Image (cartoon, coloured by chain):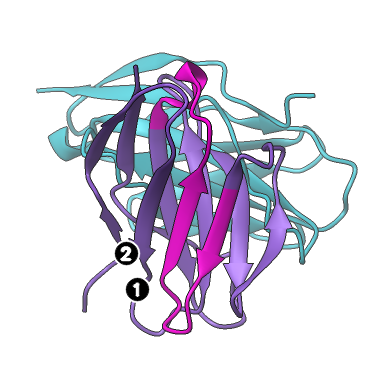
Amino acid sequence: AQKITQTQPGMFVQEKEAVTLDCTYDTSDQSYGLFWYKQPSSGEMIFLIYQGSYDEQNATEGRYSLNFQKARKSANLVISASQLGDSAMYFCAMRERPNNNDMRFGAGTRLTVKP
Amino acid sequence: DAGVTQSPTHLIKTRGQQVTLRCSPKSGHDTVSWYQQALGQGPQFIFQYYEEEERQRGNFPDRFSGHQFPNYSSELNVNALLLGDSALYLCASSPPGRSYEQYFGPGTRLTVT
């Protein structure tokens, strides 16, 4: 069964505007972690932000914030003030249970920032 | 401080051959995870190595094996290559006690013809 669903294969955003990338997940565990990674064309996966299932506040890291809605099982990434360098693939990932090292990734969303 | 490094960058092999990919973790990291990323898909977890042993394995056949050395570097071996093994192979390292915190290398692009 698909654990992570990213329904937007591609997204466009104007430079300096905000954009939301969608992610929904499926788990029966109470303890899990949600991650967002950026993958430029070079191939390296760059960690952006982390949200623990028990975290009461939404995670923020600079221009990145995670809109965590636990009841709806969604963990959308919000990028504010988009920059041309934000153009890349973005992956949502989940790690279930504290000792489970099997990180499950979604299929990704390709973000293109227009000048 | 060097990040995670992988070699080679690109590799072309023929179906049925064997391949070895290498990974050096970030300085101070002791855990190495390997992922396979097929074109247009997200990475899939192959296995994780800690203290020179395979700690956890994803849904991959025994043709995929690995090793971790005392200096924490790691190798991924794939035997009897299939066309479907063509992918980007990513290595990620983690600091002690924080295996959820993964720092990825640039990957090795394997093409099987």
Q: Position of residue A60 (x, y in %)?
A: 47, 57
Residue pictured at 55% horizontal, 49% vertical: A35
At 68% across and 50% down in the image, what residue appears?
A102
B3 up-or-down from B33: above or below: below
**Which chain letter matches label 1?**
B
Which kind of residue does numbered mark 2 sit on?
A: Val
For image coordinates 45% across by 14% down, the residue present is A9
Q: Chain B's shade in the image?
A: purple
Q: Is A29 positioned to the left or the right of B71 in the image?
A: right
Q: Quadrant of residue B44?
A: top right
Three-letter residue code for mark 1: Lys
From the top left corner, tell me how far across and down residue A28 is, in percent: 90, 42
State the residue position of label 2: B4
Number of residue marks: 2
Label 2, label 1: how far apart the Cα atoms are: 5 Å
Measured as percent of width and height from the top left, residue B88 is found at 38, 35
The N terminus of chain B: image quadrant: bottom left
Q: Which residues are magenta?
A: B65-87
Q: Which residue does the numbered mark 1 point to in the structure image? A: B26
Q: Is residue B48 above or below residue B84?
A: below
> Residue B85 colored magenta?
yes
